[in-house]
Image (cartoon, helix red, strand yellow):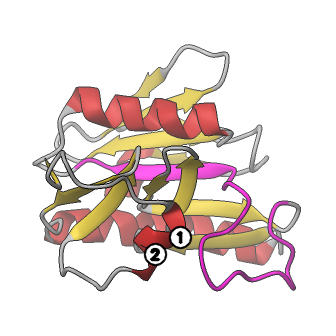
Amino acid sequence: MATVEEGAALLTAEEFAKRADSGMVEELARGRIVMSPPPGFDHGVVCNTVGRLLGTFVADRDLGRVLNNDSGVITERRPDSVRGPDVSYYSYARVPRSGRPTGYAAALPELVFEVLSPSDRWNRVVAKAAEYVEAGVSIVVLLDPRERKAHVFEADRAPVALGPDDVLRLESVLPGFEAVVGDLFG
């Protein structure tokens, strides 16, 4: 990942949202733009699979909305950070059915999935998971396509690693949701 030049002024979430599209995958980390190359084909397959499974579960129960495609989430202010989770879930309790924001939502999602890309560094991805949890996201799931594992992060709990034959349950956010970890990779 590359950041903009260090001497540049820090951006706010609102300034970041108004920037022209650079064609790169971008996030705002403590006021600075962080860029990474667009993820590859396998990354898209995994994101689509997770979004489809989660989206069907949520829609069938009319619980809220599932977003993908790096929809921005403000995780910090002063300096601002805007992250783009691969898949996220917002209940209607956090973002009411009638309150569909046009920009970044004021509320945080309850659930975030991040799919590791070949260019990702483990320490940075874990730090990003911690950032989501510290901001108020209830559960963060890191999916590692190479290892076919899920790493689950929740506040006040030790991270849990699940193998391809283990079952992922999200009881504190989506009671009844279950998926075999290996099935998440399409």
Q: Going 32% across and 56% down the picture, which residue do you hit?
A: 185
Marks 2/1: CA–CA distance:
5 Å
Q: Which residue is mark 1?
A: 14
Q: Secondary structure at mark 2?
A: helix
Identify which amino acid the numbered label 1 is placed on: Glu
Q: Is residue 120 above or below residue 20?
A: above
Front residue of 140/83: it is 83
User: In this orientation, does residue 78 appear?
Assistant: yes
Front in this rendered view, residue 22 or 43? 22
Q: Quadrant of the C terminus?
A: bottom left
Q: Residue at x 75, y 46 (%)?
A: 173
Q: Which label belongs to residue 2?
A: none
Mark 1 closeness class: few <14, some 14–19, many ≥20 residues within 10 Å: few
Residue marked by disc 2: 17
- Vertical arrangement, residue 20 with respect to residue 10, above or below: below
| Extent of the magenta region | 94-116
* Residue 115 drawn in magenta: yes
Choose between 5 and 108: the one closer to the eye. Answer: 5
Main SS, magenta region, reads: loop
Q: State which quadrant residue 85 falls in.
A: bottom left
State the residue at coordinates (18%, 45%).
Answer: 6
Query: Which secondary structure lies at badge 1?
Result: helix
> Relative to residue 16, is residue 19 depicted above or below?
below
Kindly indicate whether the residue at mark 1 contacts the one at mark 2 (C-beta within 8 angstroms).
yes
